[in-house]
Amino acid sequence: MVRLTRAIEFSSSLCYARPELSAEENARLFGRQASQHGHNYRLEVTLRGEPDPVTGMVIDLKHLQELLEREIMARFDHRDLNRDTDFFEKDPPTPENLGRVIERLLLAALPAGCLDRIRLQQDEDLWVDLIEPLA
Amino acid sequence: MWVTRRYRFPAAHVLAHPSFTPDENRRIYGKCANPAGHGHNYGIEVTVTGPLDPRSGRIIDPEQLDAIFERFVAARFGHRMLNADPAFAQRVPTAENLAQVIHAELAPAIERAGTARLARVRVVETRRNSFVYGEME
């Protein structure tokens, strides 16, 4: 089995808020994350598989890039995670929750069994890893 | 899912075992055995895992982890001579040992703080050397 990793970077604005809470309660629960702010996210997508015996590739990186543009960049880059997507109407766009959304989008878009892991970096000092169990 | 937070602190050390002669230490540890000491900008990556709190959307509050790291690691080892710390009275302050000492300090403090548990500690001693203690998979 071979693993390959492709990275993309996107910039988004966001704030942490639960709709059932008042502004004061959100500020108490989330601190300064409750204010509008933004990040330069870096997403590393790792795929696994056997290289095609003819092409020598696990996946055509051009297709992977197109998929990442369509599924991730178009949704999140230079967008507001709260206002421009419907993923965070109830739950705050923490790295954990955004990582889960991205995992779900990629699992639905990629051929079955080929997503190995994603690493979503909010900045150089905080990131989440989601690793798919081997079938 | 694993959450990793990266910290930094500068510290000094000498790699020398107290029961070895200066010649033996020089042979084993090379320039790292210089008795006057040397130092590094340590990068410490702390990886935790655990259930996602449905309300906060977090495995751990990074600011809470920051406070734990500051109290149990940075305040103790940052801007210090590692050899002077009791943890290194009987063992050499290699990055391997530092990773294990930091893991042992952080694990109970993280467990006391909530539902997350420490998975691993990575010590980046220089841009060319890094050391991991603990498991992520």
Image (cartoon, coloured by chain):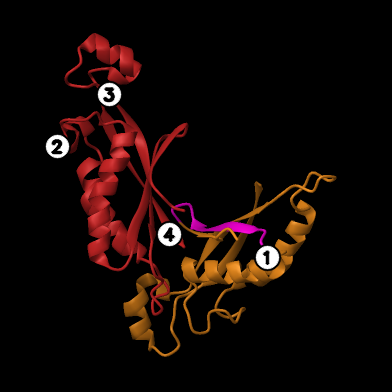
Q: Earlier in the sequence, mark 2 or mark 3?
A: 3
Q: Amino acid at mark 2?
A: Pro
| Contact, mark 3 vs mark 1 (Cβ under 8 Å) | no
Q: Say which of marks 1 and 2 sits in front.
A: 2
Q: Which chain is red?
A: B
Q: Dot 1, crowdedness within 10 Å: few (<14), some or many (≥20)?
A: some
Residues at circles 4 and 3 in contact by the CB criterion of under 8 Å: no
Element type where label 4 sits in the image: strand
Q: Real-space Cα distance between discs 1 and 2?
A: 50 Å
Percent coordinates x, y for residue A66 in the rendering: 77, 61
Q: Nearer the viewer, mark 3 or mark 1?
A: 3
> In terms of secondary structure, where does tag 3 sit?
loop
Q: Which mark is residue B86?
A: 2
Can residue A42 be seen here? The reply is no
Residue underneath mark 4: B3
Residue at x 69% of width, y 65% of height: A112
Tell me where residue A50 appears, x and y as whole percent: 72, 49
Determine if marks 1 and 2 fall on one subunit: no
Give the amino acid type for the residue marked by disc 3 in the picture. Leu
Q: Secondary structure at mark 2?
A: helix
Secondary structure of the residue carrying tag 1 is helix
Circle 3 is placed at which residue position? B15
Would you call the spot at circle 3 few (<14 residues within 10 Å), some (14-19), or many (20 or more)?
many
